[in-house]
């Protein structure tokens, strides 16, 4: 036992957090493309019935893609919270929580936008999307700053003394 386990655990969490934030940004790009396609080219007949969200989304391949990427994003954002907590940096954790809250705003607004078509829901859906993007970019910026400003130097391992 070297005594470096907490520092090594934080470094591993930061590496996972960086990979997770990059993957989340890729998922956000796919989500935005599928959502734009849905909004512009797919007609959804809902008759204002909120119980048929799955039939509305699964009516097209873009809807299925949009829904599955949303599930992936939800778990990716939860993963960033877990890894931010393990990293030991309160700012990373705060950015991750903001990202989750922004995702929930986007999901709630998107759900209601499907049925009502009201521009207010569309606006809040996009603001939530933008909030997730900004939170992930802030995480990456903070991780970059931590890497460049404070290099963690591990002390040499203490060899056990032999009598």
Image (cartoon, helix red, strand yellow):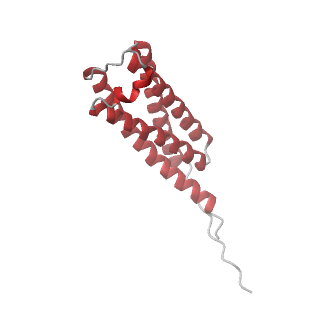
Establish if 51 lies above or below 139: above
Q: Quadrant of the N terminus?
A: bottom right
The mark total stands at: 0
Q: Residue at x 54, y 46 (%)?
A: 146
Residue most toward the left? 41
Q: Nearer the viewer, residue 22 or 160?
A: 22
Q: Quadrant of the C terminus?
A: bottom right
Q: Is residue 148 left or right of residue 37?
A: right
Establish if 142 lies above or below 98: below
Give percent across and percent down for residue 57: 35, 29
Establish if 9 lies above or below 126: below
Residue most toward the right? 163
Q: Is residue 144 left or right of residue 59?
A: right
Q: Nearer the viewer, residue 30 or 67?
A: 67
Give percent across and percent down for residue 55: 35, 28
Q: Residue at x 48, y 31 (%)?
A: 103
Q: Is residue 84 left or right of residue 137?
A: right
Residue 93 figure quarter: top right
Give percent across and percent down for residue 123: 42, 17
Give percent across and percent down for residue 54: 38, 30
Q: Nearer the viewer, residue 125 or 50?
A: 50
Q: Nearer the viewer, residue 149 or 159?
A: 159
Q: Residue at x 60, y 57 (%)?
A: 7
Q: Residue at x 38, y 21 (%)?
A: 114
């Amino acid at each position: 036992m070297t005594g470096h386990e907490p520092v090594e655990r934080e470094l591993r969490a930061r590496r996972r957090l960086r990979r997770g934030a990059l993957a989340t940004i890729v998922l956000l790009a796919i989500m935005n493309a599928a959502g734009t396609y849905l909004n512009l080219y797919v007609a959804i007949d809902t008759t204002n019935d909120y119980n048929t969200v799955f039939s509305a989304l699964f009516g097209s391949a873009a809807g299925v893609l949009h829904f599955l990427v949303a599930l992936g994003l939800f778990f990716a954002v939860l993963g960033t919270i877990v890894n931010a907590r393990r990293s030991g940096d309160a700012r990373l954790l705060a950015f991750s929580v903001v990202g989750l809250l922004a995702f929930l705003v986007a999901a709630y607004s998107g759900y209601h936008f499907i049925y009502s078509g009201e521009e207010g829901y569309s606006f809040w859906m996009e603001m939530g999307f933008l909030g997730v993007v900004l939170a992930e970019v802030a995480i990456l910026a903070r991780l970059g700053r931590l890497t460049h400003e404070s290099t963690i130097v591990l002390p040499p391992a203490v060899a056990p003394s032999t009598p």
